[in-house]
Image (cartoon, grey):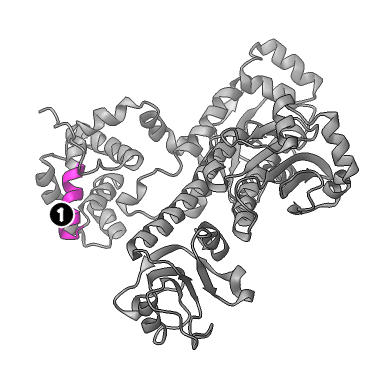
Amino acid sequence: MMLSLAILLDHLRDLPLETHIPQPNNDKVSFSRASVLPRRGDDMRQNLIYVCRLSDALRVTADVPNMWYLCIRDRLHDDTESDEEFSGMIIVNKNMDVEELLNRVQEFFDKVCDWVLQMQRALIREKSLQDILDLSTDIIGNTINITDSAFFLLARTNSIETDDTISSDLIKYGYHPESTLQIFRKAHRFEVWTQSQSMFINDNREISNYILVSKVYRFRSTYFAHVVMVCDHHPMSDGLMELFAMLADIIAIHAERNWNDKSALSHNYDSFLVDLLNGTLTNPATIQERASYLSLRTDGQLQLLKVTVENNMEATLGRVGRELSDMLPTAQVLYYKHSICVLIHLQNGSSCLPTESLLRLLTEHSAHGGLSNVFVGPEHLPAAYSQASLALKYNAPAHAAVLGESEDEGERLLCSFQDHVLRALLGEYPENEKIWRSSVYYQGLKTLHDYDCQHATNNLPLLRSYLRHERKATETGQAMHMHRNNVIYRIDRIEKMMGMELDDCNTRLGLNMSFLLLEQYGFAPETESAEQPAT
């Protein structure tokens, strides 16, 4: 993540600063992190800001131009100093330690990056608007209120006190009272909000004694939600606006989710499918009766596709759902629990999914799809939903990279429960990790891993490939780009290193299961005192 110059300057606003960065370029300058000056100019990068003494920056900049510096002034002001000489520098006119300044800046970088990550995770975990605002309190530091289209309070910064009258009344009543609405009408706020397409700054003090920054969320020309920041603690600045814009983008995704939940993809069969998924409709006769009223087919084989969208992207589930409806006209498409569910009717026992078109759609919207097993009868829809959810959950194992295997992009975007049923069986029982780590199979893989790290070998991937290819040396050699004789020699050494014989079917089963658990949990940290396996 890159942090802009404006945000950095806002964070350092308590220090006496000189900024020698040309004004037209200010909005283009951003940094990934802060760093000390490297010993060699060749090691410097433009995406970093270097914290150092002014004299050190001047010494380096002549040989390595177009870099960014945060400098502590260690020499007296000189009448001959010029912006050209100090180009790209922010000078702190205060006597302080370089390490102190570096730590302050880097801690702030880390804090903002973590904030954005935590907000994205809150979206993924379907947290509330209040949870998102609670994460933002320390970053933005101002009173923020979010209301719905009826001006009822949805969320607010609970830990920030305010003397703003409008905010106080909103907190007191839980909604904007009529007296507040009259103030809005007198100031023509409704007309402004109707026309505004972006952030709106109100600095004329008609409504509040503080500067107000607001954003209206409107979908299909319908007013849906409204977020307002009151600059009652943190003064208005370009950096503050950028931080508030980051928050507003996250709120936009949350608001559009709720809009989709209420408005998009509305069909006459929605309540029927929701009742099935929630488990409130289980009687086969009642299911058949309701389906007949809706002219829905209940015979034949069915399959469920669940689609989720990466929440930090602008692609919306509503748009994905509508495109899936066009792509699969005989299917039922439903918005359910922040995902799109597609009930597919198989033709002659085979899938009618246009795989290439579906992969393009998933790619375009940064989405992922999980397929259930084929089933007969809509009463099995809850089980199919669980299967599709598990397929998505275990589609990208957290530690798969430890085996150095590349994954097909198409398989990552579209996966099936059948492909991941073993991972789900192992991963859904939390105690499995503890049991596995105390087994001889974990210790065997750990032995190979440690040896590989020390000697730059590939024993672990070789064993995985050998087991996958049913112990066929020729096919394993082709997959690993090795001669079959070398495979046989290496496998013999691997058996001795682990103290196991691969001729034993239970040993092979235990190792195959261990590889799946390894993808899920990874190797324990070196500092962790793992239990020794029982012998």
Residue that appears at 52% across and 85% down:
82
| 374 lies above or below 117 | above
In the rendering, at what x and y percent does residue 315 appear? 66, 50
Horizontally, residue 27 falls left or right of residue 192, namely: left
Question: Is-magenta flag for residue 326?
Answer: no
Whether residue 280 can be seen here: yes
List the residue tagged with mark 1: 490
Q: Kindly identify the amino acid type of the residue bearing the numbered disc 1.
A: Arg
Q: Residue at x 51, y 58 (%)?
A: 14
Horizontal arrangement in the rendering, residue 238 relative to residue 404 (left or right): right
Residue 458: x, y in percent?
A: 22, 56
Residue 368 vs residue 89, the one in the foreground: 89
Tell me: residue 534, above or below residue 143. Answer: above
In front here: 337 or 29? 29
The residue at the point 69 percent across, 24 percent down is 273
Q: Report if residue 451 lies within the magenta region.
A: yes
